[in-house]
Amino acid sequence: MPDFDILVIGSGPGGQKAAIAAAKLGRRVAVIDRPNMVGGVSIHTGTIPSKTLREAVLYLTGLTQRDLYGQSYRLKEDITVADLTARTQHVVGREVDVIRSQLSRNHVSLFAGTGRFVDDHTVALREVNGHERLLSAGHIVIATGTRPARPASVEFDERTIIDSDNVLNLERVPRSMVIVGAGVIGMEYASMFAALGSKVTVVEQRPGMLDFCDVEVIESLKYQLRDLAVTFRFGETVAAVERHPRGTLTILESGKKIPADAVMYSAGRQGLTDDLELDKAGLSADRRGRIKVDEHYRTEVPHIYAVGDVIGFPALAATSMEQGRTAAYHACGEPVNQMDGLQPIGIYTIPEISFIGRTEDQLTEDSVPYEVGISRYRELARGQIIGDSHGMLKLLVSPEDRRLLGVHCFGTGATELIHIGQSVMGCGGTVDYLVDAVFNYPTLAESYKVAALDATNKIRQIDRLRD
């Protein structure tokens, strides 16, 4: 008889939810993770620290209040790294306590150390003191997550030339900064440091940024960031990064040279599978360290599952949690619905972006007719109260059956607001529900009614011409 029914390698969002789901179903469950990494990368260097840092930046800089109180408004004049990390350390500490408590309450055994496969049912646990012990399980869930990908040609010192995991190691808020990579993580940090007053240059080899988002939303974000003195270098590749006593020099292949106090690389992520010895379990990973799975998150070996960032897209904490739960249910023979294809995407730039469903470009490419309904925060009483004059909500509506095809939000509370659209879409509702619904006043949620009226008025105009 194996030691456990389910053994989970990694305690991030995916691993944690897989372990708890299996424990709730009465299975004997164990989790392996490094002693200082309970909660995974998400808690320690990824989602939670970066979002807490963003909150600290917004609070201390008073950025969102400047439309009301003037451009010189600041809550604190000289913001230090210590000011920023104080809030982050508090939140991370509390979150780790919550996770430990959840695992303990559900009688999940937590082993401190790292794991590697001995065979497809056995994992060797290497403890902190160097001792190894074997743990066997009927099912194994790989939830090891990822680390930032680092180009071999760049000398990272984790102080001036850093990746997204080392941001809080900076000794001071840099006066100038180069961010290589205009993906989600790169743009989130670009907006945070720009808000702190750093002169940020973003270098991206592609012709644009966040090309999976609505074009109008991205144009709005670019405008906001340029207003905070962010410079964009699209279609450019970094040839070399030099470290000097007084800062760094980033040299582009086009010959441009960019001096800065610090350089941050945000060039994708690499699956943490190198030390798992996957071959001993009959598994393999691609060059990015990612493991292939089926719709139930099973690997090539049916009793071994993989969830979270280690399986690749969408690599979000929210989807990882659901993948973990789904994998555990499947492993335990519990009925489970497949994850809904409608997943909200949240990007915590300043201002934030969130969307669900298709974009205008995708609908046009697929020859799907649609009408657009827009609500701007500056036209809402709540928008005036909070001082957000740039936010907007966009609804894409089918003129044929009046269902929502996509919802795109930009501005304060976008990542919260999107769930109203998600609920309507998920339940197969139409734009008429939003037209007829009564929303609290004054709220940002009222933007749904305004945008819905805008879309239906346009549809009505077309219908009248046909009559």
Image (tube, grey):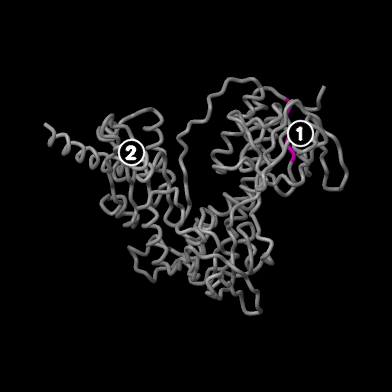
* Residue kind at label 1, given as amino acid type: Gly
Q: Main secondary structure of the magenta part?
A: strand
Task: Specify whether residue 98 is in view.
Answer: no
Name which of mark 1 and mark 2 comes first in the sequence: 1
Spatial CA distance of label 1 from label 2 is 44 Å
Image quadrant occupied by the C terminus? top left
What SS does tag 1 mark? loop
In the rendered image, residue 404, in percent from the top left (x then y), is placed at: 33, 35
Task: Specify whether residue 388 is in view.
Answer: yes
Q: Residue at x 53, y 68 (%)?
A: 79
Q: Nearer the viewer, residue 302 or 347?
A: 302
In the rendered image, residue 90, in percent from the top left (x then y), is placed at: 61, 53
What SS does tag 2 mark? loop
* Residue kind at label 2, given as amino acid type: Ser
Position of 321 with respect to 136 (left or right) is left
Q: Residue at x 16, y 39 (%)?
A: 461
In the rendered image, residue 120, in percent from the top left (x then y), is placed at: 78, 31
**Residue range highlighted in magenta:** 28-32
Reading the image, the residue beneath label 2 is 367
Residue 29, magenta (yes or no): yes
Q: Nearer the viewer, residue 57 or 322?
A: 322
Task: Identify whether 231 is placed above or below 416.
Answer: below
**Could you tell me if the residues under marks 1 and 2 are in contact, i.e. CB atoms within 8 Å?**
no
Residue 366, magenta (yes or no): no
Residue farthest along the bottom direction in this orientation: 246
Reading the image, the residue beneath label 1 is 282
Q: Nearer the viewer, mark 1 or mark 2?
A: 2
Q: Nearer the viewer, residue 219 or 143?
A: 219
Q: Residue at x 61, y 74 (%)?
A: 248
